[in-house]
Image: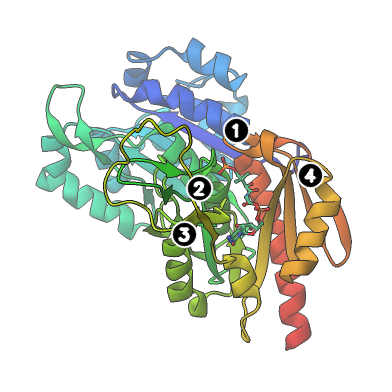
Amino acid sequence: MTETSRKKVLLGLTGGIAAYKSAELARLLIQDGVDVQVAMTQAACGFITPATMQALSGKPVFTDMWDARVANAMGHIELSRGMDAIIVAPATADFIAKLAAGHADDLLSTLCLARECPLLVAPAMNRQMWGNAATRRNVAQLLKDGIVVLGPASGDQACGEVGMGRMLEAAEIAAAAIACLAPKTLPGVRFLITAGPTFEPIDAVRGITNRSSGKMGHALARAALGAGAKVALISGPVTLPAPAGAEITHVDTAAQMFEAVKRHVTRADIFVGVAAVADYRVDKPRRHKIKKTDESQLQIKLVPNPDILGWVAAQPRAPFCVGFAAESRNLDQYADEKRRRKKVQLMVANLAQEAIGSDDNEVSLLDDSGTRRLARAPKEVVARQIVDHIAKLYGAKRHKTK
Ligand code: PMT
């Protein structure tokens, strides 16, 4: 990524206990290649120090309208120009009220008023404050003004109460921000994505599964959403939160995944099989837990599962198909053989032992025009590069069939 292609985000913090999560938010955005400039209100500085945010962002933090570092004392204009987005997290009830009324009495509110870019706010407050009629009116006004409101979530609050008002987790805010920054290369295109492992029961409590975490498939879903696509995600058992904006179906077994794919596929323009689907399942799993006996062996008969990707690609009106090949050796050769055998337009090859469960990945993209290697990077970054590649191939295919 070149310096000029890096997206610039102004991260604004207001005075709430959730400010500690903004340190992680800054870290995640930077890890994703975003150039982050932090601005804090005086109240925010009471919860987390500018020094912490400066250390994480690698840049001086702005807290004051009259900061001498900004030329012409026009900090509000200077700092908001050239930004691709402003994110205010946490956004207190008071700050939301200011935004709704268009007040500009400190640096951050002035920056928001002077902006030329999208504004995202992540509310964080006590549940009574969130439920108050005044806050409801203010939030409705923000939405009317085109401001993106992320959350809040429900749960335990710092004040000891439980309810709506918790700021979203840093990863959720980062994902929404990245999606907002992405170029809309696939507007309205309908993706169907499978993700995660499958779980094939042996008996009432045991089963056969694999180490897939679902991170790659979920990252792909977020990247596609970021590119403006509509996403249906069919996920095996994972512990990840659903990507905001995706229609998610949870399944356990390969057979359930296959049924869910069959239900959705006629509405899909692009199918991406990221799931690590079990090739075999147990023939007649037991309804009750198998008891230990004195026998020296226990035989379990396995029967093949349907090849979901192969089936989708063989349909008369098949969507544009993308497969993932997880190999432990001869990566490109085996992946290309799979691409040809399953008749998919694009095969993404990765080393199973390095890709599965980890936060980053190194992949090769194999299509009719050859092989392209992508450098090792966080799965979120790799996913965006894969979606960019899909957008090019899919755009070219659409152009040809017109
Ligand atoms: O979930 P993570 O921890 O982030 O790990 C990501 C990953 C390593 C699982 C992912 O990047 C990946 O490689 N997914 C494919 C794993 C796999 O099952 O590969 P395969 O070579 O066995 O299958 C090839 C393709 O056929 C895949 O697109 C798979 O979804 C599909 N398939 C396989 C078997 C089957 N019965 N039905 C299928 O649709």
Please report whichever mark, 1 or 3, sits nearer to the chain's N-terminal start: 3
Please report whichever mark, 2 or 4, sits nearer to the chain's N-terminal start: 2
In percent of the image, x 57 and y 58: which residue is there? 224
Q: Nearer the viewer, mark 1 or mark 2?
A: 2
Q: Position of residue 290 (x, y in %)?
A: 32, 41
Q: Is residue 296 visible?
A: yes
- Callout 1 environment at 10 Å: few (<14), some (14 to 19), or many (20+)? some
Placement of the N terminus among the 4 image quadrants: top right
**Which residue matches tag 4?**
374
Q: Position of residue 59 (x, y in %)?
A: 61, 20
Please report whichever mark, 4 or 3, sits nearer to the chain's N-terminal start: 3
Q: Nearer the viewer, mark 3 or mark 2?
A: 2
Q: Which mark is residue 358?
A: 1
In percent of the image, x 59 and y 54: which residue is there? 274
Front one among 150 and 232: 232
Asked if the residues shown at circle 1 and circle 3 are in contact, with their CB atoms under 8 angstroms apart, the answer is: no
**Which residue matches tag 3?**
233
Q: Is mark 1 within 8 Å of ligand 1?
A: yes
Q: Is mark 2 within 8 Å of ligand 1?
A: yes
Separation (CA) of disc 2 from disc 4? 24 Å
Asked if the residues shown at circle 2 and circle 4 are in contact, with their CB atoms under 8 angstroms apart, the answer is: no
Q: Is residue 117 visible?
A: no
| 266 sits to left or right of 146 | right
**Which residue matches tag 2?**
197
Name the amino acid type tagged 2: Pro
Examine the rendered structure and indicate whether residue 369 appears above or below residue 331.
below
Separation (CA) of disc 1 from disc 2? 14 Å
- SS under mark 4: loop
- SS under mark 2: loop
Q: Position of residue 226 (x, y in %)?
A: 55, 55
